[in-house]
Image (cartoon, helix red, strand yellow):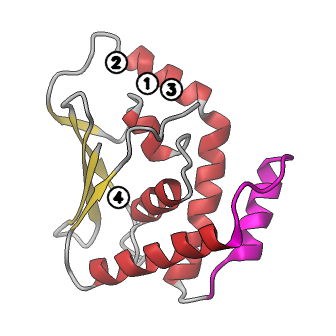
Amino acid sequence: MEIHFRHDPRGESYTRIRRVDGVVLGLPSYSRKWRVPHDLAHAVAERELGWGGGVFGCIAAGGVFDNMVVLRGKTRHDARVRSQRVFRSAKRSIGVAECLSGVLHHAVEHRLGTPLAEAREAWGVLREDSFPWQDSEIRDATDRLRELAGVWSGGADLDFHWPERLRPA
């Protein structure tokens, strides 16, 4: 799946997503008050940490959020049912993705250090199993988001590859 983050003339970001089935989706963002788009934080956190059950893994699996629009391509005959099934099965993992991307987003947006303790705490709020990432993985994901935030803040649009293996379990 290919994800294209572009600057919207209203000061927002707009995400264009080309799934492997050829369907192209539009995802508006409402993050004008932030330097770093929230959807970019999701994409980076989820991809870099290998979390397939988040927002973009669900989209890759056929999930379509209510605020998304089909820009091009033909969806499957059962697209709505499939989308509901994807989101229902990933409900818990989307919550984890929301927390982790929020932790990374906050650190990068406010130019803080790597949020190691915050990531562990966010995990512990939602999960009872042990934290699955090494400190170096959280550091690398945060650094990658910092890097892309710098490119974005400079006015450039971003192309982002989503690995096909990252989908809800």
**Nearer to us in this view, 155 or 134:** 134
Q: Are marks 1 and 3 in contact (CB under 8 Å)?
A: yes
- From the viewer's perspective, is the residue at label 4 or at label 2 nearer? 2
**Nearer to us in this view, 16 or 52:** 52
Q: Which residue is mark 4?
A: 29
Image spot of residue 145 (x, y percent): 45, 73
Q: Is residue 88 left or right of residue 75?
A: right
Q: Are marks 2 and 3 in contact (CB under 8 Å)?
A: no
Query: Callout 1, which amino acid?
Result: Ser
Query: Callout 3, which amino acid?
Result: Val
For mark 4, give the secondary structure.
loop
In the picture shown, does residue 4 fall above or below 57? below
Label 1, label 3: how far apart the Cα atoms are: 5 Å
Q: Residue at x 47, y 41 (%)?
A: 166
**Mark 4 surroundings: few (<14), some (14-19) or many (≥20) residues within 10 A:** some
Q: Which residues are magenta?
A: 113-135
Checking the image for residue 79, the label placed there is 2
Q: Residue at x 35, y 75 (%)?
A: 148
Query: Callout 4, which amino acid?
Result: Ser
For mark 2, give the secondary structure.
helix
Residue 64 position by quadrant: top left
Q: Which residue is mark 1?
A: 83
Upstream in sequence: badge 3 or badge 4? 4
Q: Which residue is mark 3?
A: 86
Label 3, label 4: how far apart the Cα atoms are: 21 Å
Upstream in sequence: badge 4 or badge 2? 4
Label 2, label 3: how far apart the Cα atoms are: 10 Å
Label 4, label 2: how far apart the Cα atoms are: 23 Å
Label 2, label 1: how far apart the Cα atoms are: 6 Å
Q: Residue at x 44, y 38 (%)?
A: 165
Q: Is residue 19 left or right of residue 129?
A: left
Q: Is residue 134 left or right of residue 71?
A: right
